[in-house]
Amino acid sequence: MTLSHFIVFNLTCSPEEIILSSTVNYKILEPMSLTTNSSNSMQILENKSVTQRPRWLNLPKAISKFFSRNRLVDTVDGKEVQEIMAKSSTTPQLTANSNIIAEWMRFPFTEDKQTLKFIKESKIMFVIRGLSGSGKSTLVRHLQSIYHDSIVCSADNYFMKDGIYCFDQEKLSSAHEHCKEIAKKACVENRNVVIIDNTNVRYWEAKPYFNIASNYNYINIVASPKTPWKLDAKELSQRNKHDVDLITIQRKVNSFKDFIPFYYGWFVNEQLSVRLLSMGRDYFKECLELYPLFKQHLQTLCPDNTDGNLIKDYFPEHPKRKILHCTSRYVGKGRAEGGKEYHQREDVQNSYGKVFIVTLYGFIITDKTLGARIHLPQEALVLFDNPEERQRDMASSPLKSQVSPRKTSRHSPLKSPVSPRKTPKQSPLKPPVPPRKQFDTNAKFDECIRGISLLKTSSSQSKENLSLKSESKDVAAITTLFPLVRPKSRGRAAHMTLGIADKIQSKQTTIDLLDICDIEKSSSATPHDFQHVREGKSRFYDDSHCCIYLDKPYNIPVLFSGSY
C-alpha cells in the first residue's frame, strides 16, 4: 500500500464575525489586539475498520477509517498505514494550520475568530466530557493545537510509564487527586487555558474543577465531542484505546447525563471585570458627594460604618470571585420552571462558548444594589429570558396600585415597585467633576489591566438614526436624551451586578432596575434634571434610587456560557 491511500478532503468554513452597527457614539472596551491565524485545521481520521462509514465521508469502498490513537488502517490487507507513515520524512499532525476540520469538532471556540481572540486573552477552563472512544482525546489535541499555551490535566497521565499506559484500579483515586492538584497549580500560575481531560460522566466528578475555576476567576466551558457514536456502547467498546469492556461502557453510557448549569449568561473576563467594578465604585462615590440626602439615607441603614468608608461597609467585595456576568436565564440545573427547556433550545446550544458584544450604557445605585446596565444586540436578545421582566410586562394594574408601604431597613424583604417621584430640587448644574486618571479617555487603562485600551468610534453617528420602532410613538422622555435607555423595551432588565448590601439576594438588582425603568417611563427628562459626572450624567430620583447615564457607551466582549 502506498501513501496514495491517504484521503484528504476539504471542508471550508468562514468563521462568523460579529458586525457592530450603531447610531450612538461608542467606546470599545476590549482586550489587547492579537494576531490570530485564520487558516483552517486539518485532520487525519484513523483507526480500526468499521462496518458502516460516516455519511459525511466519501471514502473508497476498499478503505474505511476512523479516529483512535492517530492511526489509519487499511482494511483490505490489514497493513497499518502508520508503518508507512513512519518511513515518511513528515507525518501529518492535527494542527490549527491544517486544512480540514471534522464536523464533530466545529465549535465557536474552535472556529469563531472573535471567540478565539477573547479566549487567548482571558482565563478559561475547558471541562471536556466523553466516554472512552468517543473522540474526547482528539478534541483535546485540537484545542491544544489552537491554544498553544494551554495545559492539559488528565487522570490518565498518572498511569503513563515510559509512554505506556499501565492502569491500576487501586490507584484511580490517587490519579484524580493528582489531576486536581495539577489543575489548581495551573490556575495559581494564571495559565491562560486549562483543559480538564477526564470522562466526567457525572456532575460530582467535575464539580472540584468548577470550584477551582471559580476560586481563581476562570470562565468555564463544558465541551463534548459531537461524534455520532458518542453514546453507542458497542461502537465505543471497539474504538476505545484502553480496552474498556462493553458492560463497563454500557454502565457509563446509562449514567452519562447533561450538565445543566445554575444559570446561563454572558461572562466578562477577569481583567475587564476588575475595570468595571472600579468604574461602578467610583460613580457610587460621586453620587454620595452630589446627593447628601442619598448619603444620609444609606448611613441610617449602615450604622456599623465607623471609618467613613461607606462603600466598603455597604457593598463589601467578594473575597475571591471577581468575574462579572449578565444572566440570560436562571435554569437551576434544570429544576427551575422552564429551565430544562431553555437548556435544550437549539439556539442556546449553538451559542454556547461564543463571544458576543454587549453595550454598557449606565449604572444604577440603590439602597440595596449597585449594578451596570447592559444593552443586548439582537442575536443576544433572543437568548435573554427574564421571568421578572415578563411578569412586570404582564401586570395589568397601574404602578401606583402596586406600591406597598416603604421599608426603611436595608434588610427588609424585596421591595415592591416604587411609585415615581419628582426629582428633588437640586442646586444649579455643578461644573464637571475634575478628571480622574482612571477615567482619562486619552490614556491607557490602569496598569493592572495589561494592554487594554479605550477606543472611540466615529462621532459622526447620530442619534436620529437610532431605531426606536419597537416603541413606536410612545417613547419615554429619557430615551430622547439617552437613546439606549429604553425603559419600555424587552431586555431592559439586562444588567451586571457589581455589589449588593449585606443579607440581600443578588436577584434584587433585577427588581431595582425594573423599578427604575418604571420611574423613567413616567418621569420628565430635561437637561436640567441631571448633574454632571465624569463621562456622563447622574440623576437622583429619590432617597433610594440614583442613576448614571453614560454619554458614550462602552462595547464589551463577553462569553456566553454557564455557571456550574
Image (cartoon, rainbow, N blue to C red):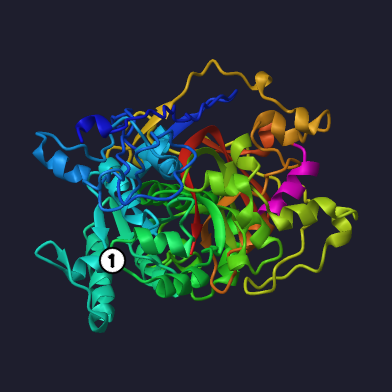
Q: In the image, what residue occupies the spot 36% across and 41% down?
A: 438
- Asked if residue 138 lies in the magenta stretch, the reply is no
- Mainly helix, strand or loop, the magenta region? helix
Residue 324 position, x and y percent, is: 47, 54
Residue 559 position, x and y percent, is: 46, 46
Which residue in the rendered view is the most extreme toward the front? 77
Number of dots carrying numbers: 1
Residue 489 position, x and y percent, is: 73, 40
Q: In the image, what residue occupies the spot 28% across and 74% down?
A: 176
Report the quarter where the N terminus lies: top left
Boundaries of the magenta span:
513-524
**Circle 1 is placed at which residue position?**
242
**Dot 1: element:** loop
Q: Is residue 108 above or below residue 160?
A: above
Circle 1 crowding by C-alpha within 10 Å: few under 14, some 14–19, many from 20: few
Residue 283 position, x and y percent, is: 49, 48
Depth check, front residue: 517 or 427? 517
